[in-house]
Image (spheres, rainbow, N blue to C red):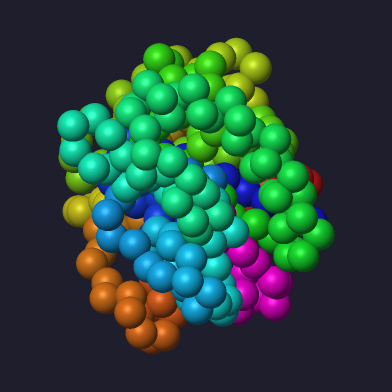
């Protein structure tokens, strides 16, 4: 069985789309693969055939993996209500309405559930491609984290860290993220991916060498900036082809299967 978690240096760096692409590549290569995000937040949700609610990001990833969307792919969904409150949806059903601090306390109850459910998924699928949320360097939340390094630690998953170069400061983001991780967490990060690159890759290559030397982690590839409509099968296939062409998939496979 194999697994991999895609984490990012921040929100909107492209984690969801990379997970979808990896799910499609693995499916194309003959593996049964499942997307998984232990906790997601948003109002753009989907109702499954069983009447359960889940994040749209995991719906796209499910289609990429050739699966019917199901809430086990997104066991905890937070729906903001305003005034610092949110609905907490657990396994597709409303669990509680709570404040941000209230949910921080609830997370203590969810760790064992997430571990047990994840273990069942590992028995069912060849590979699970996991997605983190925001950044693993949110040091104020680390003690009860169940979606980034806390989740990776819970199920012993290797991590690939994604940075967004389009915003600027990608090298500082990668180095700063690694700086703020605990020493025991750093070996989990097995590679980096730089996403949303525009321009001549030759100008970027010296920086790739320097950041590898600084953080002691290899770069698995650089993805160009792109904007796909992924609602149809062709869009997902083109996304998978783009990622396969620009990422060292042999290195990714070695990480997934812990070789």
- In this image, 76 relative to 29: left or right? left
- In this image, 246 relative to 91: left or right? left
In the image, is residue 179 above or below residue 15? above
Residue 146 x %, y %: 55, 33
Is residue 136 shown to the viewer in this render?
yes
Residue 149 x %, y %: 56, 30
- In this image, 30 relative to 71: left or right? right
Residue 23 x %, y %: 55, 66
Q: Residue at x 70, y 35 (%)?
A: 112
Q: Residue at x 34, y 27 (%)?
A: 100
- Number of callouts in the render? 0
Which quadrant of the rendered structure holds the N terminus? bottom right
Is residue 62 shown to the viewer in this render?
no
Q: Residue at x 32, y 47 (%)?
A: 79
Q: Nearer the viewer, residue 3 or 60?
A: 60
Q: Nearer the viewer, residue 215 or 107?
A: 107
Q: Nearer the viewer, residue 213 or 19?
A: 19
Q: Quadrant of residue 116?
A: top right
The segment highlighted magenta reads 25-37
Q: Nearer the viewer, residue 16 or 78?
A: 78
Check if residue 259 falls in the magenta segment: no
Q: Residue at x 53, y 61 (%)?
A: 71
Residue 145 x %, y %: 52, 27
Q: Quadrant of residue 232?
A: bottom left
In the image, is residue 28 above or below residue 201? below
């Amino acid at each position: 069985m194999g697994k991999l978690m895609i984490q990012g240096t921040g929100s909107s760096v492209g984690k969801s789309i990379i997970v979808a692409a990896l799910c499609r590549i693995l499916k194309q290569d003959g593996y049964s693969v499942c997307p998984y995000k232990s906790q997601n937040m948003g109002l753009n949700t989907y109702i499954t055939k069983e009447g359960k609610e889940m994040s749209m990001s995991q719906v796209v990833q499910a289609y990429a993996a050739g699966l019917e969307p199901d809430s086990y792919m997104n066991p905890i969904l937070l729906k903001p209500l305003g005034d610092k409150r949110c609905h907490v949806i657990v396994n597709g059903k409303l669990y509680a309405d709570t404040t941000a601090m209230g949910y921080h306390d609830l997370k203590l109850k969810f760790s064992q559930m997430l571990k047990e459910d994840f273990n069942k998924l590992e028995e069912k699928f060849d590979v699970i491609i996991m997605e983190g949320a925001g950044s693993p360097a949110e040091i104020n939340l680390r003690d009860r984290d169940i979606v980034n390094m806390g989740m990776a630690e819970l199920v012993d998953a290797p991590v690939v860290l994604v940075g967004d170069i389009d915003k600027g400061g990608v090298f500082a983001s990668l180095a700063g993220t690694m700086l703020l991780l605990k020493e025991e967490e750093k070996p989990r990060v097995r590679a980096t991916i730089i996403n949303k690159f525009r321009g001549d890759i030759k100008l970027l290559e010296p920086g790739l060498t320097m950041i590898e030397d600084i953080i002691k982690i290899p770069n698995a590839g650089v993805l160009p900036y792109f904007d796909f409509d992924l609602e149809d099968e062709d869009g997902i296939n083109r996304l998978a082809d783009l990622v396969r062409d620009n990422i060292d998939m042999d290195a990714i496979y070695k990480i997934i299967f812990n070789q």
